[in-house]
Amino acid sequence: MAYKINDDCISCGACADGCPTDAITEGDSKYVVDEEKCIDCGACADVCPVSAPAQA
Ligand code: SF4
Ligand code: SF4
């Protein structure tokens, strides 16, 4: 399991700053989660202002 960021992302960067495994990076139109690095902690969903990260 890994978190996935949906199209509601406004690229604020808060999730990337809070991710313990540096799994989140800025993509072309939104931030993206590296499924290999995600440990399913949920921190990104907690800090996101638009609830874009969710368990995939
Ligand atoms: Fe990073 Fe945790 Fe979000 Fe996975 S669930 S992308 S490890 S903050
Ligand atoms: Fe996008 Fe939410 Fe991450 Fe901000 S915290 S970059 S809106 S997924």
Image: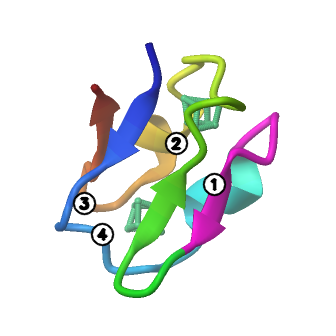
Q: Is residue 2 magenta?
A: no
What amino acid does circle 1 point to? Ile
Q: Quadrant of residue 25?
A: bottom right
Q: Residues within 10 Å of mark 3 (few under 14, many from 20)?
A: few
Mark 2, ligand 1, within 8 Å: the answer is yes
Point out the tag, 4 or 3, that comes first from the N-terminus. 4
Residue 30: x, y in percent? 38, 75
Q: Is residue 21 magenta?
A: yes
- Residue at the spot of label 3: 50
Residue at (44% x, 80% y) in the render: 11
SS assignment at label 4? loop
Mark 3, ligand 2, within 8 Å: the answer is yes
- Residue at the spot of label 1: 24
- Residue at the spot of label 2: 44
Point out the tag, 1 or 4, that comes first from the N-terminus. 4
Point out the tag, 2 or 3, that comes first from the N-terminus. 2
Residue 53 horizontal side relative to residue 16, left or right: left
What amino acid does circle 3 point to? Val
Mark 4, ligand 2, within 8 Å: the answer is yes
- Residue at the spot of label 4: 9
Pair 3/1: label in front: 1
Q: Are marks 2 and 1 in contact (CB under 8 Å)?
A: yes
Colour pattern: rainbow
Q: CA distance from mark 2 to mark 1?
A: 9 Å
Q: Which mark is residue 4?
A: none
Q: Quadrant of the N terminus?
A: top left
